[in-house]
Image (tube, rainbow, N blue to C red):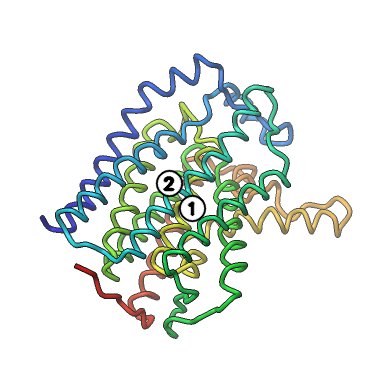
Amino acid sequence: MNTGIWTVIAAAGSFGAAALLGIWLIPFLKKIHFGQTIRDEGPKWHDSKKGTPIMGGFMFIISSIVIGSLCLVLYHKFGVEETRLLTAKIFSGMFMAFAFGMIGFIDDYIKAVKKRNLGLTVIQKLILQFVAAIAYLVTVALFGGKTETFIPFYGMFDLGVLYYPISAILIVGIVNAANLTDGIDGLDGSVTFFMSIFFMLIASFVSKMGVSIMAAALAGGCLGFLVWNFHPAKVFMGDTGSLYLGGYVCALAFAMDMPIILLVVGLIYIVEMFSVILQVLYFKATKGKRLFKMSPIHHHFEMSGWSEVKIVVMFSVFTIICGSLAFILVVNGNYRIPAFVG
């Protein structure tokens, strides 16, 4: 069977599974009263969202892992057997994403049970997140992973022992940036959908079809979730979903030895994160003045009169531009395409 078919099957299957899961999951979350709490300092019109079910991220978590894993197994059985290292990167990457999702689940559970917009402390989250990131990096190293990373227009560059602390910090940073991007209906799911599409295309170009299948499963899952999450949202992904998305896109980039490409494809994540950092620093430096009307920056545009749909569309267009640039950087960037085994 043509290897590209498995990518299509992964995307379509994950979309269908995520969309269908919403039929059962949303009423279940309402039944157990797992509803959203709203920040006091957030936009006042978000008060109407109070009580909307959270933890909808389980839709794409289940669909991407189950459908993605099934397609990967069948691809290896009937398609081309990939290297043992790449296979280890893919499946350990899925496990890492799931671990981040479970950290988010704990956070969401505490919020839902205590009915307040506070979950795990910042320190608790960071400790658990670094444990998940380090466990992934150690697993890959045990399977023979190298410390090389792709640098556009240069090729592969060996970071040596610095690879591990830099990678752990990058993973945790991207995961939290993805979490900050989840603030309005459909935003995080839409941005990550387009990121997944470009990772799928990049992986296909560098002949890592297992990663392409993995990316397709995430893209399909995000799209299936958006059936229920696009404005007006009937369910939110919660930290369960947003932390999982951050972990998953990191797994895609690291599986191809391209962590630096995360900074291009996921530039919206980065902008969201730095808008919060800059807001805090500016507020402290000026003793109370604000750089943005509200952070993360999607709330600044909301406070400036943009509708949620307009913000989602514009941020998605920006992600498409960033993804296109990332693809060009890989195509023209001296990437060494590895050989398959089998």
User: What amino acid is at disc 2?
Assistant: Ser
Say which of marks 1 and 2 sits in front.
2
| Residue 190 disc label | 2
Q: Is residue 97 above or below residue 23?
A: below
Q: Is residue 191 above or below residue 47?
A: below
Residue furthest toward the left?
1
Mark 2 is surrounded, within 10 Å at the Cα level, by few (under 14), some (14 to 19) or many (20 or more) other residues, namely: many
| Residue 320, position as x, y percentages in the image | 40, 59
Q: Which residue is mark 1?
A: 315
Camera sees residue 158 = yes
Instruction: Specify the quadrant that holds the C terminus.
Output: bottom left
| 89 or 251, nearer to the observer | 89
Q: Earlier in the sequence, mark 1 or mark 2?
A: 2
Give me the C-alpha separation between circle 1 and circle 2: 9 Å
- Secondary-structure class at tag 1: helix
Q: What residue sits 48% from the left and 82% below the top?
A: 157
* Mark 2 secondary-structure assignment: helix
252 left or right, relative to 130 = left
Residue 310 appears in view: no
